[in-house]
Image: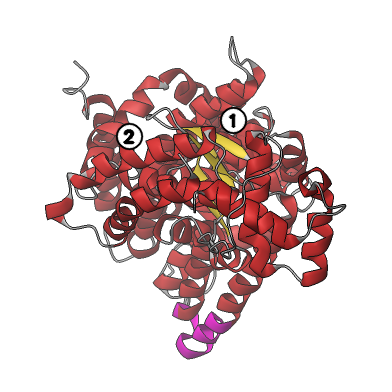
Amino acid sequence: MKQEVFEKKHAADWARFEQLLRTPRANDAHDLPILYRRICQHLALARSRLYSPPLIRHLNQLVLRGHQTLYGKASRRQGRIGIFFGVTFPQAVRNEWRLVLLSSMLFFAPMLVVGLAVQYEPELIYTLMEPAQVGSMERMYEPGQDRIGSERDSDSDILMFGYYIWNNTSIGFRTFASGLLFAVGTIFILLFNGLYIGAVAGHLSRIGYHETFWSFVAGHSALELTAIALSGAAGLKLGLALLSPGRRTRFEAVRMAARTSGPIIGGAAIMFFGAAFIEAFWSSMTWIPVEIKYGIGITFWLLMIAYFVFMGRQREA
Amino acid sequence: MKSIETPEGIDLCVSVAGPLPRATAWLLDALIRYGMLFAASFLISLFESAGIGLFLILIFMIEWFYFVLFEVFMHGQTPGKKMIGIQVLNDDGTPVDWGPSLLRNLLRVVDFLPLFYGFGLMSMLANRDFKRIGDIGAGTIVVYVEKTAERNDIPSARPQSPPVQLSLEEQQAVIAYAERYSGLSKERAAELAALATPLAAPLPKTTPQHLLEIANWLVGRR
């Protein structure tokens, strides 16, 4: 069949298809797939008969747009958030429990060790921080302030909220991404932050600021520390894919690892936001009795553990 | 040129974008991002320390989510990409959604090392589809947006059958020449037509008119 005859014969189909792509209406919904398959056939014919390149390009474009319309964004918008928090996120964390455990050990173990060590060897803190930093940290948690956790009383909550989001979530993202450096980056960040936090906690407890410090961290520690451990786990998953891809190529292994660790880092980011919110607007308040803060803190930890252990289980079967 | 196989069994052709257009688009986006931050820095003066908080949140969002929001809501094109005419697609040709977009942009951290996208550039040069590390992890590619193909009508001429039997490729070449004819200068048209000397028999040289006549015949106008 000659090209022009071909074009004349099918021009109506192509015009209609373009119209359907531009303004999709419910009434025409079943026309679209039928036309799409027909135009795929036209493209195949045009290619095998070697019609002119502009015609082939035109048909290729039609097919591409049809392909994107029909196969893109399959799931509905509503309910996806619910499914994410109800099923995807906790299941992803449970699936990777070994890496979560490893990441937690890399993070919490140095924290405990240094925290205790600083009680007996006070100078240890100066290997991690300069004296000026130690001083400013002590000022932040000095008892008797209107607000704990920031150096100037006049800092507003929103300022600290912004700071915590910017600082803490970025650390979490970097922990995740540096997993691609054969996990070295992730391990380093986890160890360093564990040591740092442990040293701070130990030092402040030793010099008698334990009430301000622990009441400050109680509220948001559940969310934040766990988010760091989860980011580390997600990063380790990527690193593991590079280090030992098994029977896949490294590309494939990384892609598969990214697919499964994606929900983990996404959920961790939300946890960071929540922790930032609590840290900025609740933890720094001094007028709340200390016992209430401890109580809330413990409650959050229990709720969080329960969430990851029990949530999303019924769908697994 | 990359071929994507569709469920219908037909191959889609897309043009993958190389490091240079992507780098240019990134620079344009960087200018826009810093422009936004600069404009937003006036928030500080308005709100004092609460403004600093908002500003920090804005820095965070712009650093991590500027690309994601545009890629998800604007068909894979940030403003910089739109100016260059490229877009982000999934490996199978579909538009990107939250998952892949978040992933490829979080992994920018690694692409940026050791110095200004060093790893990303190495990855792009080593990969057949110019993928940086974020693209590999998320399963995305960056392709040129096809401008709606302009198709010119073949100028009509008295249809004449070719003096020799033409293969399919040769027929395609003649028809393509005829479709491009309106965009060519006279000298160029003559230059190209002269390449097809065997078709000229018995004359020594082919003219554009010759080829147009043959093209008209090939295309089916009798």
| Label drawn at residue A89 | 2
The three-letter amino acid code for the residue at tag 2 is Phe
Can residue A204 be seen from the camera position used here?
A: no
Q: Identify the residue shown where x is 78% and y is 71%.
A: B186
Q: Is residue A272 above or below residue B170?
A: below
Numbered-mark total: 2
Asked whether the residues under marks 1 and 2 belong to the same chain, the reply is yes
Q: Please say whether residue A78 is one of the residues in the magenta stretch.
A: no
Q: Nearer the viewer, residue A28 or A49?
A: A49
- Residue A95 x %, y %: 37, 21
Q: Residue furthest bottom?
A: B46
Q: Nearer the viewer, residue A222 or A175?
A: A175
Which residue lies under the disc numbered 1? A110
Q: Nearer the viewer, residue B70 or B158?
A: B158
> Which chain does the residue under circle 2 lie in?
A
Q: Residue furthest top?
A: A247
Mark in front: 1 vs 2 = 2
Query: Dot 1: few (<14), some (14–19), or many (≥20) neighbours within 10 Å?
Result: many
> Which chain does the residue under circle 1 lie in?
A
Left or right: where does residue B24 sit relative to residue A239?
A: right
State the extent of the magenta-drawn residues as a range. Answer: B39-50
| Label drawn at residue B146 | none
The CA span between labels 1 and 2 is 27 Å
- Residue A237 x %, y %: 53, 26
Left or right: where does residue A251 sit relative to residue A217?
A: right
Label 2 element class: helix
The three-letter amino acid code for the residue at tag 1 is Pro
